[in-house]
């Protein structure tokens, strides 16, 4: 194989790695200042590459409630952590712990969900040691 082909192939492989890393950046979220809110799930999008939930926050009496889009990891990561498509459904009320969006818009990256029963839904972004 010619050196030019090897250099071209290596360049292509390395350039795709940068794209993948950029896609998985959490720079949009303030992970250092997580917040908690109570609310109701309005929409569930259980799709790759990331699951999203539209959550309507409980408003104070006399104030309108606010909705936001909250991202979580991939279906594979959540499934390995014990979640199913039915773990959190539209109409479910819960307490949501999340990293807010840095731009101040409603929404963020979900870190943990506590259901009224006390059950906690969380996940690990690191695979088990045996994999």
Image (tube, rainbow, N blue to C red):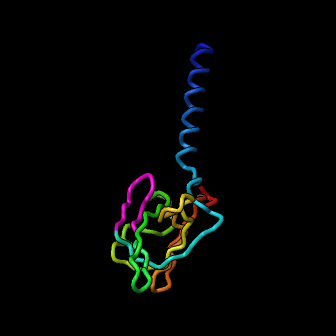
Residue 95 placed where, x, y %? Answer: 49, 79
Image quadrant assignment for residue 55: bottom left
In the rendered image, is residue 112 in sight?
Answer: yes
Front one among 89 and 80: 89
Position above or below: 102 against 35: above
Quarter of the image for the N terminus: give it.
top right
Q: Residue at x 56, y 55 (%)?
A: 28
Q: Residue at x 51, y 77 (%)?
A: 120
Residue 52 belongs to magenta span: yes
In the rendered image, is residue 78 in sight?
Answer: no
Q: Is residue 30 left or right of residue 75?
A: right
Residue 107 placed where, x, y %? Answer: 48, 64
Front one among 40 and 102: 102
Front one among 68 and 94: 68
Residue 81 placed where, x, y %? Answer: 51, 66
Q: Is residue 46 left or right of residue 33?
A: left
Residue 47 belongs to magenta span: yes
Instruction: Kindly give the residue lying farthest to the top in the view shown.
Output: 2
Query: What segment is highlighted magenta in the picture?
Result: 43-55
Position above or below: 22 against 77: above
Q: Is residue 21 left or right of residue 82?
A: right
Quarter of the image for the C terminus: give it.
bottom right
Residue 50 placed where, x, y %? Answer: 45, 56
Image quadrant assignment for residue 123: bottom right
* Count of marks overlaid on the render: 0
Q: Residue at x 56, y 44 (%)?
A: 22
Instruction: Kindly give the residue lying farthest to the front in the view shown.
Output: 62
Q: Residue at x 47, y 57 (%)?
A: 74
């Amino acid at each position: 194989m010619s050196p030019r082909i090897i250099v071209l192939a290596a360049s292509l492989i390395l350039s795709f790695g940068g794209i993948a890393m950029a896609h998985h950046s959490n720079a949009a979220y303030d992970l250092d200042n997580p917040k908690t809110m109570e609310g109701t799930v309005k929409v569930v999008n259980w799709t790759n590459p990331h699951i999203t939930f539209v959550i309507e926050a409980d408003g104070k009496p006399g104030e309108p409630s606010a909705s936001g889009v909250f991202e979580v990891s991939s279906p594979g990561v959540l499934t390995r952590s014990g979640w199913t498509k039915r773990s959190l459904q539209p109409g479910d009320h819960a307490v949501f712990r999340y990293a807010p969006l840095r731009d101040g818009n409603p929404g963020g990256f979900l870190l943990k969900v506590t259901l009224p029963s006390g059950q906690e839904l969380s996940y690990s972004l690191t695979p088990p040691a045996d994999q």
